[in-house]
Image (cartoon, rainbow, N blue to C red):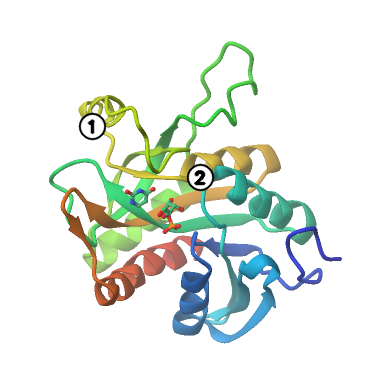
Amino acid sequence: MATPHISAEPGDFASDVLMPGDPRRAKLIAETFFDSPRLVTEVRGILGYTGTVEGRPVSVLASGMGIPSLSIYATELARHYGVKRIIRVGTIGALQPWLELGDVIAASSAHTNSALTSGWVPSVTFSHAPSFSLLRKAVEYGEATGKTIHVGPLFTTDQFYNPDTTVVPKLIEYGTLGVDMEAAGLYAVGLKEGFETLMVGTISDKPGQDMTAAERETTFADMVSFGLAAFK
Ligand SMILES: O=P(O)(O)O[C@H]1O[C@H](CO)[C@@H](O)[C@H]1O
Ligand SMILES: O=c1cc[nH]c(=O)[nH]1
């Protein structure tokens, strides 16, 4: 049965789902990487497709932007469609100056200014971390292919435009690699709903530099390859 936000029928989603923020990236991923992709939901323009990759069923569903939006889709996938593993494939703003546009990052943890998990365990600051087995497989794919993946903490922010300019320098000092708006939420919802998670992302911008559309397309292919390899 459809949910308030997903019009797919039971069985329409594979148990492994890639999750970009952007619905158009979901379409591009399905058309580029999947055999026989079919559209399974498009409520609110949030596109979801299911197909196969090397014979294994896999789906892609956009999350929209920010933790509240991602939480809705990830929760409904787990509760209504039996999804067991979700890998976010998103864009990341570089925080460390040595990162280059197009670099791929796997988030081994995610700091956040979101209040999502603040009350989950009274008086405890919750940690937001991925499935070790998915992270390990992504890293092993890099080792096997010679493709570089940087592994480290991200900052998941509720504010794309944060007026507090003291936050980022401190996060940089503590070794945070980059910033996104969903990873910590995905890791938290995965724990709550009992599915495995990973965030693999591409650096799309750094101070004074932005990718061209063509660069985005080719570099996104790298992060999707890491995500699909982690599902194997
Ligand atoms: O490119 P996506 O996956 O949407 O990810 C990043 O881009 C959006 C902000 O521009 C946020 O969703 C952020 O996390
Ligand atoms: O959240 C994000 C994602 C990409 N680039 C940014 O600067 N912020």
Picture quarter containing residue 146? Answer: bottom left
Q: Look at the numbered disc 1 and give the secondary structure of its residue.
A: helix
Q: Which residue is mark 2?
A: 131
Q: Which residue is the extreme one toward the right?
A: 1
User: In the figure, is residue 60 to the left or right of 161?
Assistant: right
Q: Indicate if the residue with disc 2 has its beta carbon within 8 Å of ligand 1.
A: no
Q: Which residue is mark 1?
A: 172
- Going 58% across and 11% down the picture, which residue do you hit? 123
Rendering coords of residue 78 (x, y %): 71, 53
Rendering coords of residue 108 (x, y %): 39, 41
Q: Residues within 10 Å of mark 2 (few under 14, many from 20)?
A: some
Rendering coords of residue 67 (x, y %): 55, 44
Mark 1 against mark 2, which lies toward the viewer?
1
Q: Tell me which label, 1 or 2, sits earlier in the chain.
A: 2
Q: Look at the numbered disc 2 and give the secondary structure of its residue.
A: loop
- Going 47% across and 45% down the picture, which residue do you hit? 183
Toward the viewer: 49 or 53? 49
Residue 2: mark: none
- Going 25% across and 55% down the picture, which residue do you hit? 205
Q: Amino acid at mark 2?
A: Ser
Q: Is residue 7 above or below residue 134?
A: below
State which image quarter holds ligand 1.
Answer: bottom left
